[in-house]
Image (cartoon, rainbow, N blue to C red):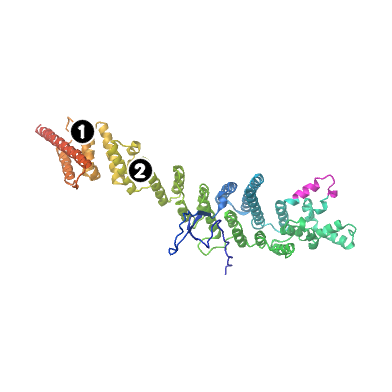
Amino acid sequence: MEELDGEPTVTLIPGVNSKKKQMCFDWGPGEMLVCETSFNKKEQPEMVPNCPFIYIIRKDIDIYSKILRKLFNESHGIFVGLQRIEEELTGKSRKAQLVRVSKNYRSVIRACMEEMHQVAIAAKDPVSGRQLSSQVSILSAMELIWNLCEILFIEVAPAGPLLLHLLDWVRLHVCEVDSLSADVLGSENPSKHDNFWNLPGNTQTLTELELKWQHWHEECERHLQDGTFAASPHLESLCKIMLGDEAALLEHKELLSNWYHFLVTRLLYSHPTVKPIDLHFYAQSSLDLFLGGESSPEPLDNILMAAFEFDIHQVIKECSIALSNWWFVAHLTDLLDHCKLLQSHNLYFGSNMREFLLLEYASGLFAHHSLWQLGVDYFDYCPELGRVSLELHIERIPLNTEQKALKVLRICEQRQMTEQVRSICKILAMKAVRNNRLGSALSWSIRAKDAAFATLVSDRFLRDYCERGCFSDLDLIDNLGPAMMLSDRLTFLGKYREFHRLYGEKRFVDAASLLLSLMTSQIAPRSFWMTLLTDALPLLEQKQVIFSAEQTYELMRCLEDLTSERPEHGEPDAQQLQDDDIETTKVEMLRLALARNLAGAILREGSLEGS
């Protein structure tokens, strides 16, 4: 049965007393809003004006650190590169490439750590300086853990070379040893330097020491038993250290920064060819000896111990609990998964450990206004739930600018996310309508293939034409092409604009035929018929007969249908009376023009038949 986690830590919100005030909250994709409220209606409300604060609780605050954003950006490129080259890797080249990728990740961590260290030193605010220093310690611990995992799980160093890797690991992460060695060896007479005897191990002779360890061990043991160094406590102590005497090593505990420093020093002088399978035994005993029951292991100690036990699952679990964001566990797990080390760790809710952690990390990135773009690639490389998660998160991105919207839209179109494309286009179309940018609104509604919204925007175009007497965004309307078939109203808008173009080119017969077809085919809205009939007036008044007798009858029928359906109003006001007078005048002018045109058309058609 799976081990149960402990109780989660309680996060206290400054200034909130949950015992006196009730709280309400609302979850967001990456944060939670919390505010004070009261649901007890029986109690009399306080007659004091107040305005409760609204608190924003973020799930992952590290994404708002400028320096850590560099970590996220740089590691993103490494991550994507690893996914793309994975299929090409085989055999030894595969292992070498994975080690190289691991070192690249560590170099990014170290670069961010050094930059943050410099910022912490230069910080003028003590509180800010302490926070940065704390973050430096976390980054240092992250590199320490990653480096150990690289040695044990990725390089898989065998007995012999394993200790050399561990020595490099300690030297890299325990700065005091290297600085002390450099200070001593850089003096004129190293053996007379004050700190010469304080060096727990001379790292300059590691290779030679490993080759001749057995001989040295026997020599040291013989000299110690013979009392060769009895007259010199320092030499005798050094001899005991070279024999790997635990008591002698612990006498110099203050020179050993931590228990794993003690572990590697102990292995160097007692078990230089230690096998990986035996590491956990020496690690546990070194931890117990070093702490001596005076203190409990820290979270970092537990993580390192799990690594020495080759318990990858526990390493990832402990890191997930101890670290403040998902970056570390997501990338480390992904790399270990590429090493084929996590095949047996599947989660019961449908996704394996690698995918689960990558999804969590990517979700956190989507809470940031710019880092969300990195999250897209992480979702792409989650084969089971990545696409679904991307669809859910991308819909929540605030489209503050058209540039950002186009970026989101391009991402959706590249992945054939049809519904999201339509949703984004519709949002942009609505924004454009609110800002009275009808051309943009029509363009977005066409791109969204939203017939209803295209109809709405087309109506706005027609209404604007009625009010202003001209069209805006002529280039767009003139080049609608097949897109005008999206809705009847859009088709009418395109054809009506074509009528105006034909009329402007003095192609009156073609213009008249198109105008009549718009009315008789029922594409034109009834509310626009009077405008169309009014547009027919100049054609009816031409010296040359444009409309045939049959066409004129059709226009007359349309006019009568329109006037017979006019609704009766109640008590009219002055404006209504004025509008009615204008409408009546238009109708009379149209009837007169139609009658004249009909007479001329009959005469013309009769004369043609007679001839």
- Three-letter amino acid code at the position of disc 2: Leu
The answer to which of 428 and 52 lies nearer the viewer is 52
Quarter of the figure with the C terminus: top left
Looking at marks 1 and 2 on the same chain, the residue that comes earlier in the sequence is marked by: 2
- Three-letter amino acid code at the position of disc 1: Pro
Q: Bounds of the magenta span? A: 178-193
Tell me what residue is drawn at x 87 percent, y 61 percent: 224
**Residue 253 vertical placement versus 477 (above, below):** below
Spatial CA span between label 1 and label 2: 30 Å
The answer to which of 15 and 427 lies nearer the viewer is 15
Q: Which residue is mark 1?
A: 538
Q: Main secondary structure of the magenta part?
A: helix
Q: Which residue is mark 2?
A: 442
Quarter of the figure with the N terminus: bottom right
Tell me what residue is drawn at x 43 percent, y 47 percent: 413
Q: Secondary structure at mark 2?
A: helix
Looking at this view, name the residue that lies furthest to the bottom: 1
Residue 494 position in % (x across, y down): 30, 40
Q: Is residue 447 visible?
A: no
Looking at this view, name the residue that lies furthest to the left: 610
Q: Is residue 327 magenta?
A: no
Q: Is residue 371 left or right of residue 444?
A: right
